Image (cartoon, helix red, strand yellow):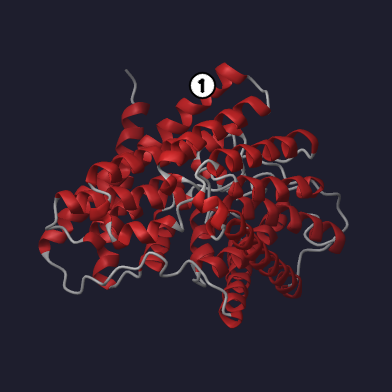
């Protein structure tokens, strides 16, 4: 999922401790997945009680602006008085690193409350960015108390990534997910790369087994499509075209982040409450008229996939655009969260709209290829994006090929654009 929160700037520690043993990795991995499971259960319980299973809120749409503004105010209070971190700096990749957040476990209470209030406020953020920040703080605390990985910033990094592997492999529902991500992003240039990857795979397996044995719901197969079976030559062309469309969606998301950051800085400077309340007000208005755009989109997406015709191609396209804009607004205003589910939601809406306009293209190809392409650029990690989409969308072998072609198309386009910008004159 997602350099991750705190891994870019590991805490500076005095010498005297020892590099971690496998028993330390096991212990930290168990604590990481236990905390993550508890956090997800708490988040789901709260959001259902306040919003989804609340008959009063469901029957009174005016509760949308009331609830959004109330929780937005609480986010601001956490930032001001509990020094809660944000994901306001950088782009989507940085948000998965904690937005440049320097690990400081003393801010954990503020981060925990702010993350929950952000998710409950209805703004367009997912839970993964919050988990990165919180696990980073917990890992830093454990390293200090256990006096492990104190002499090497690289070793400290390795412990943190292993803890995140346990957390994310459980909730994603795949034992290799964070191993692939760490290899793409973190492990490659490290002196002890093989050792860190071993820790990562061990901790990730623990997290996966924890979720599996307890029967906790993961995100695997959460946006399932029927396998395409046979691979027709025309599908390859679809994958290339959809890869271009997904790349354009990711580019639009990046431009939205940059543009929103400039507007927020110019209008609000470094004030805390005005941008948060403004973002809450905008989200309230849009959510009042289009409730499907509230929250990360992971719950609303199923009903839309079941009957996209009832919504129509025009509204699906509008929702795809608005979701990205709301995501950028939430990030640049001070809420804590992650971008993966909002981007998946937007890519899915775009894929469904294209399928309605061009029904000859299978809906699974339309949706999953755009998801793989958009996430490849947004995360900067094509292998991780392909694996994530394959796990969530239950891709078979022919679909895996199409996802790869779509992701490669996006990365080639991005590489060509970077070279063109870097060229003199």
Figure check: 191 above or below 256: below
In the foreground, 1 or 340:
340
Instruction: Determine whether the residue tagged by mark 1 lies in a helix, strand or loop.
Output: helix
Residue occupying the point 74% across, 52% down? 137
Q: Quadrant of the C terminus?
A: top left
Q: Nearer the viewer, residue 318 or 327?
A: 318
Q: Residue at x 36, y 35 (%)?
A: 252
Residue 278 figure quarter: top right
Give neighbour class at mark 1: few <14, some 14-19, many 20+ (Cα, 10 Å): few
Q: Position of residue 101 (x, y in %)?
A: 67, 41
Q: Position of residue 310 (x, y in %)?
A: 25, 53
Q: Is residue 127 left or right of residue 367?
A: right
Instruction: Identify residue for label 1.
Output: 263
Residue 269: image location, x then y, percent: 63, 19
Does 366 sit above or below residue 274? below
Q: Is residue 326 left or right of residue 309?
A: right
Location of residue 161 (image quadrant):
bottom right
From this viewpoint, is residue 99 visible? no
Q: Position of residue 158 (x, y in %)?
A: 66, 59
Q: Is residue 164 visible?
A: yes
Q: Nearer the viewer, residue 100 or 34?
A: 34
Question: Which residue lies at the image location 32% right of the left edge and 69% below the top edge?
Answer: 395
Would residue 359 appear left or right of 54 to someone viewing this image? left
Pick whichever, 143 or 53, lies toward us: 53
**Residue 162 falls left or right of residue 138:** left
Q: Quadrant of residue 255?
A: top left
- Residue at 30% of width from left, 51% of height from top? 370
């Amino acid at each position: 999922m997602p350099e991750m929160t705190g891994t870019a700037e590991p805490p500076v520690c005095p010498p005297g401790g020892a590099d971690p043993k496998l028993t330390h990795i096991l212990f930290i991995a168990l604590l990481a997945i236990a905390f993550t499971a508890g956090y997800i259960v708490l988040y789901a319980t709260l959001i259902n009680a306040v919003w989804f299973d609340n008959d009063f809120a469901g029957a009174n749409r005016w509760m949308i602006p009331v609830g959004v503004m109330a929780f937005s105010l609480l986010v601001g209070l956490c930032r001001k008085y509990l020094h809660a971190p944000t994901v306001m700096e950088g782009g989507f990749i940085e948000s998965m690193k904690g937005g440049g957040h320097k690990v400081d476990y003393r801010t954990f209470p503020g981060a925990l409350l702010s993350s929950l209030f952000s998710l409950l406020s209805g703004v367009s953020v997912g839970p993964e960015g919050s988990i990165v920040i919180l696990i980073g703080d917990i890992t830093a605390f454990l390293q200090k108390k256990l006096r492990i990985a104190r002499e090497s910033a690289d070793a400290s990094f390795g412990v943190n990534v292993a803890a995140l592997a346990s957390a994310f492999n459980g909730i994603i529902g795949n034992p290799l997910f964070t191993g692939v991500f760490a290899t793409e992003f973190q492990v490659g240039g490290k002196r002890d790369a093989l050792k860190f990857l071993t820790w990562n795979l061990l901790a990730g397996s623990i997290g996966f087994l924890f979720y599996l044995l307890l029967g906790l719901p993961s995100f695997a197969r959460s946006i399932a499509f029927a396998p395409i079976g046979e691979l027709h030559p025309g599908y390859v062309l679809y994958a290339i075209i959809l890869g271009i469309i997904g790349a354009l969606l990711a580019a639009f998301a990046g431009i939205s982040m940059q543009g929103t950051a400039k507007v927020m800085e110019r209008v609000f400077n470094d004030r805390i409450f005005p941008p948060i309340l403004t973002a809450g007000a905008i989200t309230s208005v849009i959510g009042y008229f289009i409730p499907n755009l509230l929250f990360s989109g992971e719950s609303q997406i199923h009903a839309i996939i079941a009957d996209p015709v009832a919504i129509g191609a025009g509204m699906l396209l509008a929702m795809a655009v608005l979701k990205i804009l709301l995501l950028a607004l939430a990030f640049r205003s001070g809420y804590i969260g992650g971008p993966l589910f909002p981007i998946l939601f937007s890519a899915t809406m775009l894929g469904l709209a294209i399928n309605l306009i061009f029904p000859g293209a299978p809906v699974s190809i339309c949706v999953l290829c755009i998801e793989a392409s958009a996430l490849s650029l947004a995360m900067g990690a094509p292998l991780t994006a392909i694996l994530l989409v394959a796990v969530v969308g239950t891709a078979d072998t022919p679909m895996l090929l199409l996802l790869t072609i779509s992701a490669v198309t996006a990365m080639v386009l991005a590489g060509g654009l970077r070279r063109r910008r870097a060229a003199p004159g």
